[in-house]
Image (spheres, coloured by chain):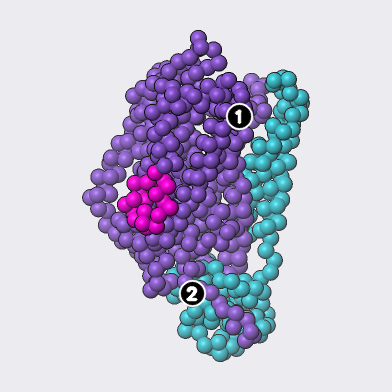
Chain colours: A cyan, B purple
Amino acid sequence: MSESSVYGLMAEFDSAQELVAAAHRTHDAGYHKVDAFSPFPIEGLAEAIGFHKNRVPFVVLVGGIIGGLSGYLLQYYVAAITYPTNIGGRPYHSWPSFIIVTFEMTILFAGLSAVFGMLALNGLPMPYHPVFNVPEFKKASENGFFLVVFSTDPKYDDARTREFLKGLAPRMISEVPS
Amino acid sequence: MEPGHTFATIGEKVSNIVLKRPISLGWVLGFLIMFSGMNMLLFAMGYLFLKGTGIWGINIPVGWGFAIINFVWWIGIGHAGTLISAILCLLRQTWRNSINRFAEAMTLFAVACAGVFPLVHTGRPWLAYWMFPYPNTMNYWPNFRSPLIWDVFAVSTYFTISLVFWFTGLIPDFATMRDRAEHPLTRGIYGILAMGWRGSARHWHRYETAYLLLAGLATPLVLSVHTVVSFDFAISIVPGWHTTIFPPYFVAGAIYSGFAMVLCLAIPIRAIYGLEDFITMRHLENSGKVMLATGLIVAYGYGIEAFMGWYSGNQFDSMLMWNRLHGPYAFWYLSLLTSNILIPQLLWMKKFRTSTFWLWVISLIVLVGMWLERFIIIVVSLHRDFLNSSWGMYYPTKWDWMTYTGTIGMFLTAMWLFVRILPMVSISELRTLLPEAHVHEAEEVRR
């Protein structure tokens, strides 16, 4: 199917409610390579198209651990090993003084991992994407609710998928050129 | 939000301020005034770099003058933005969706202004990078036991996280701007910023997780920043600084002045740009209530300071309180009590909380009061040293004033540009407030 000149079929719906219902029915009908587009986050839509593996929290956890460890170890290395200085008679490894920088580094690394991890997992930046070829898709950032069945789906068939989508009563159906 | 809006009208109303509204004469005049203020800052800094910090009023015993007062004041103002965007997000206070964008912008610009001061206060700002730990040929490392180094980490982390938090919130709105823009150049610029955002359900899901986690990370961060700033004082042994109440009292004061700045900006902006539908009286009233609550915490802090002056039995602590009330700066201490404690009590009355005029005036008074608080903390504590022979007075010079008012110019220049370049209200978050945005439970049952 990869040599097909069609990226998929796009259906537009009138409301968030209809989009979620349509996504459920499409997923139940056996289409798994599906995506839905909306101008704002809709609760339950990602689950409806069968998206469950969200790895953002894991990335943030790893980032936070790396940040905290590197913050503490850096201070330990500096204050106790490479540049030991006597500050008010405190021990070289005066851990209470190291808490703040450790904390800030944890937050910094975790926060940056959240943003860049989210962008990387989403595959952004991606200036070109086939869905932008459909003129109506402009409304996806306004008030349009779209469902796309990819042509790479094993069940995908130009005519039959179109029939199926028609049964969901969309506002319009359009072919997405790849 | 006021009724009668749809997904499209929200996008239209917010984006038109940037895309369609012609630039008015008032905007240009205001911009010129603010921009000249910013240039005054650059001039004052240029002369400072030439001559050194001797052009300021600082001397021994008052070595921390305007630079540190303004640093603490600006960074405190920034705190309200993060409080609104992160803490109220975690508490599911959805009314915050209308004001978080410009409050976050306010945070960024305020922290940028704050950052100027410790940098120029070092005297040799071109060597400021020595504060960062990096392997160097001097074989030198910073002292991690110093609160001033904690500050470097806290403030730079705060700025970075505030920036990415703000930018993350803007990504879906950049996509709306890209799709609404008519000029190819505008479309191109917003398109690059949107990074190809297309509103995919998978993307939204990860986006929301990341946004929530950022809010969860920014919440302890914002509390830590002013705590660390207060450590600059509390870790020392100077009477009036060496107290354990400083961290919570500084954080409350920061939020207090920050909400005052939010009101100071929001009231004129909503009137000029016709955003009364989104920034409603409820937002203003809630901000007034937050000011009242944090103001009372600050008042409690003042009370404890006075109490400890007596209860500690320490002659230097008692002397500090006596000196605040009767010393050469007594007028300013009494002005501080009036503007931070007395006048904001008007906010108990609904009449004042729901009047834009009074809210604006009270906010302005609180901003002045919070500036005076830092002045009192720094100057009054320092000018009477332990030995009478090292007592002195502090007089700011014209260069101090030029630097201070210059940062106000820089802050407002940035705000001025922000309202014309970026959507100042979060379009995608406002849309989620509409009832149509919620998929009803019935749908789940039907399945």
Q: Which image quarter: residue B12?
A: bottom left
Name the amino acid, label 1. Tyr
Q: Nearer the viewer, residue B164 or B287?
A: B287
Percent position of residue B212, x then y: 60, 58
Q: Quadrant of the N terminus of chain A?
A: bottom right
Q: Residue furthest top?
A: B389
Residue B272 appears at what percent x and percent y? 30, 56
Q: In the rendering, which numbered label is found on residue B198?
A: none
Q: Is residue B361 magenta?
A: yes
Which type of secondary structure does the marked residue at label 2 adopt? helix
Disc number for residue B311: 1
Looking at the rendering, the stretch of residues picked out in magenta corresponds to B343-363
Chain of the residue displaying label 2: B
Kindly identify which residue carries mark 2: B435
Q: Are both tags, 1 and 2, on one chain?
A: yes
Q: Residue at x 71, y 39 (%)?
A: A70
Residue B82, given in percent of the width and then of the height, sits at: 52, 49
Can the viewer see residue A134? Answer: no
Q: Amino acid at mark 2?
A: Pro
